Image: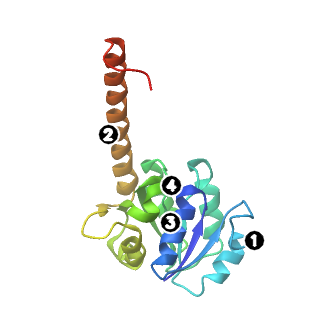
Amino acid sequence: MQVGLVGLGKMGGNMGERLREAGHTVVGYDTDPELSDTESLTAMVEQIGSPPRVVWVMVPDTVVDPVIDELSGLLGTGDVIIDGGNSRWVHDAPRARRLASRGIEYLDCGVSGGVWGITQGYALMVGGDEGTVAKAQPIFDSLKPAGEFGFVHAGEHGAGHFAKMVHNGIEYAIMQAYAEGWELLEAAGHVRSV
């Protein structure tokens, strides 16, 4: 597949490489010209070919809406935008409705895997319509780890980012518990400083 990828930081850049290794054509855009394959979102959309096009957005939550708004003026009926950042799940259904009014389909995708995802694969939690998920399935299959695990269509718009929020809550609680346990062991004199 041909994929536009917006945001080529540590995760976005690695995801682009994993997709390329799987045989997809990726045109990446980043505000850092050193990372970008193209000079603008307009040029990126032109380079990924004719509809239906898929554009994956991996940018900080504070700029997701401006990026999606710009893309909505460049894409058309049947095209798909995937927000793979850590957006708030409550923003997904309104985004999907706004894009649907222009004929553009939308998926929200919680992504876990960090910098190791390039070799190990990413855990993907997707929210949105089943037909839209099917359009992007080759991308999801290339990003997830080999085997049956690593991908879930979690439900309607917002479900992917909601699942990622729950995932983060569990992960951070476990890290906090480890830190508190370590602190208690140090205070009790059972741990030597490293």
Q: Nearer the viewer, mark 1 or mark 3?
A: 3
CB of mark 4 within 8 Å of CB of mark 3? Answer: no
Q: What element carries label 4?
A: loop
**In this view, 44 is above or below 154:** below
**In this view, 106 is above or below 170:** below
Q: Which mark is residue 88?
A: none
Q: Earlier in the sequence, mark 2 or mark 1?
A: 1
The kind of residue on which mark 2 rests is: Ile
Spatial CA span between label 3 and label 2: 24 Å
Q: How was this image coloured? A: rainbow
Which residue sits at x=30%, y=61%? Answer: 155
Q: Using a 10 Å C-alpha cutoff, classify the residue at mark 2 as few (fewer than 14 neighbours), some (14 to 19) or many (20 or more).
A: few
Q: Nearer the viewer, mark 2 or mark 4?
A: 2
Residue 121 shows in this picture: no
Spatial CA span between label 2 and label 1: 39 Å
Q: Read off the residue under disc 3.
A: 15
Q: Which mark is residue 170?
A: 2
Q: Which mark is residue 85?
A: 4
Q: Nearer the viewer, mark 3 or mark 2?
A: 3
Q: Read off the residue under disc 1.
A: 39
